Image: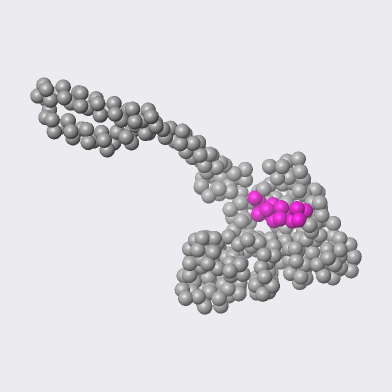
Amino acid sequence: MGSAQCLTFMSWALDFWFGGTLVEKGEISAGDVFKTFFILVSTGKVIAEAGSMTSDLAKGSTAIASVFQILDRQSLIPGSSNNGGDSASSGTKLEKLTGWIEMKKIDFAYPSRPETLILREFCLEVKPGTSIGLVGKSGCGKSTVIGLIQRFYDVESGSLKVDGVDIRQLDVQWYRKQTALVSQEPVLYSGSIRDNIVFGKLDASENEVVEAARAANAHEFISSLKDGYETECGERGVQLSGGQKQRIAIARAIIRNPTILLLDEATSALDVQSEQVVQEALDRIMVARSTIVVAHRLNTIKKLDSIAFVADGKMVERGTYVQLKNKRGAFFNLATLQD
């Protein structure tokens, strides 16, 4: 601060000394000297203090560099970015996807913890148009299965096939358009309800939006709002209740008519009344789709075609709800605790 003030006064002194010299020679007038002085008064202090901002500028530069490192980072999944180019259109596009999923002897660990296996020789088969629930303790690998099916990560060993084709051979952007995810905490964006629904299908017609909302049990509450489908959701959907946000997320998932539907604890954060309404919508949209449901509340998966109990990264039991309860194994113990 002291050096900044020193530079300011020195610039003023230089102005009067050099300006006075020029006035004496008749090259400029005294008014010109004072004009220069007032310019220095208004700008000199700012220029002098710029030096004190050097450390802040350095910090800002470092912060910006770290942001661009993230923005410029290339995905390890070829073709998963939306930047275009040859990689964006590589891979196989099937004429029709039936939703047959095969996971065989999969080992997987997250890149941030390569020494900790989440899945160990994990096997799972989902036949076209059937539903299966994944249950087990927290951290057993249920949500990891969902991430692998969406190809957010590639398996380290074993195979993951969709309709008999290794998932790594499929065009990743095309494949993800055939899937839809409804998670525990729905992601809504600032904009209208209609905007948030059509994110699932950008070229959707108004009729498709309404039909998707009806299927998600959302049309009634949307219509009761003053602005209807043009109602602003607010940042992250703060203007809506948890149940309303979840139903909009379901409508966004269903509008793309996915072959594979992934539900990751979609009702676990809701109250009993909201859960019932949302569950009715989920039961409706699961029909004729390959559906994988991750759940903690076992009452939400009683109607599924089968249930798999996962423990320590392996599937240890599989059957219908009744079969697993009668087996009196790990699933029975979990069901007894919840009862």
Give the side of residue 235 with respect to residue 312, left or right.
left
Q: From what the image shows, is residue 52 above or below residue 320?
A: above
Quadrant containing the C terminus is bottom right
* Residue lying at 32% horizontally and 34% vertically, measured from the top left: 45
Q: From what the image shows, is residue 259 above or below residue 115?
A: below
Tell me if residue 141 is in the magenta stretch: yes
Residue 87, x across and y down, in percent:
56, 45
Query: Between residues 205 and 61, which one lies in front from this camera angle?
Result: 61
Q: Report whether residue 201 is seen.
A: no
Residue at the far left in the pictured view: 26
Give the side of residue 99 with respect to residue 140, left or right.
left
Residue 69, x across and y down, in percent:
54, 39
Q: Report whether residue 213 is seen.
A: yes
Tell me if residue 306 is in the magenta stretch: no
Residue 31, x across and y down, in percent:
13, 33
Give the side of residue 243 with respect to residue 330, left or right.
left
Find residue 128 and report its image quarter.
bottom right
Quadrant containing the N terminus is top left
Magenta span: 138-152
Coloring basis for residues: one colour
Query: Between residues 78 and 26, which one lies in front from this camera angle?
Result: 26
Query: Between residues 156 and 296, which one lies in front from this camera angle?
Result: 296
Q: From what the image shows, is residue 93 above or below residue 247?
A: above
* Residue lying at 22% horizontally and 27% vertically, measured from the top left: 15
* Residue lying at 86% horizontally and 60% vertically, measured from the top left: 330
* Residue lying at 53% horizontally and 39% vertically, measured from the top left: 66
Count the marks: 0
